[in-house]
Amino acid sequence: MIEFVDAGESEEAARGFIEYWLGPGAYDAMEPRIRELVTRGMVKARAEFPLAFEERGASVQALSALSMPIQLIGGTGTTRAARAVMDVLRGIWPEAQLAEITATGHMAPITHRERVNGVIEHFLAGQPIQ
């Protein structure tokens, strides 16, 4: 993504980003208006991306000190990178509730919002997921 943006090829940056998270053909399948918004957002995403790797107080020690209930949500078809993050978080918060939503990927809050919202609603209501 960074290389494409730096080369002035924001559309290719957007295509690669969207297809990594949603799968082949996802970028071209988007509504033109949404595709244009995503493409224009690549310059901003490029500027923010390196910041995602800065600690900024979110150390393992700080995260493990959290004492509130935690709900982790993952899609069974997510990327290896997202699954690795989930594995790290499960190690930090072994008592966290975990919901794996079948046949969804990393973007399940967009592609399967009803299912994700159901998990969140059950968690907020203090009810177990069925």
Image (cartoon, rainbow, N blue to C red):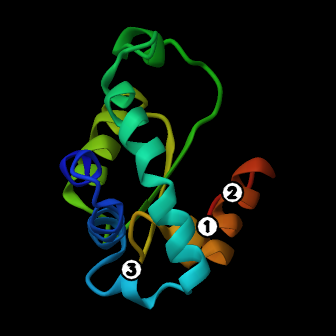
Left or right: residue 61 compared with residue 128: left
Instruction: Point out the frontmost of discs 1 and 3.
Output: 3
Residue at image x 44%, y 16%?
58
Q: Is residue 9 above or below residue 33?
A: above
| Disc number for residue 124 | none
Q: Identify which residue is drawn at 65% across, 58% down.
A: 128
Amino acid type at circle 3 is: Tyr
Q: Horizontal and vertical percent for residue 66?
A: 56, 18
| x and y percentages locating residue 42 in the rendered image | 42, 53
Quadrant in the rendering for residue 49: top left
Where is residue 81? Give x, y as percent.
23, 50
Instruction: Estimate how packed mark 2 is, as few (under 14), some (14 to 19) or many (20 or more) residues with alpha carbons within 10 Å.
Output: some
According to the picture, the residue beneath numbered tag 2 turns out to be 120
* Label number found at residue 27: 3
| Residue 118 image offset from top left, x and y in percent | 70, 68
- Which label is found at residue 116? 1
At 64% from the left edge and 63% from the top edge, which residue is drawn? 119
Nearer to the camera, 105 or 3: 3
Query: Does 38 sit left or right of 85 as displayed?
Result: right
Circle 3 packing at 10 Å, graded few (<14), some (14-19), many (20+), is: many
Q: Earlier in the sequence, mark 1 or mark 3?
A: 3
Q: Earlier in the sequence, mark 3 or mark 2?
A: 3
Tell me whether circle 2 and circle 1 mark residues in contact (CB < 8 Å): yes
Q: Amino acid at mark 2?
A: Ile
The answer for how far apart the CA atoms under marks 2 and 1 are is: 6 Å
Depth check: 105 or 44 in front?
A: 44
Q: Is residue 112 left or right of residue 27?
A: right
Mark 3 or 2: the one toward you? 3
Q: Mark 2: which secondary structure?
A: helix
**Identity, as a three-letter code, of the amino acid under mark 1:** Val
The image quadrant that residue 10 belongs to is bottom left
Work out which quarter of the rendered image holds the C terminus and state it.
bottom right
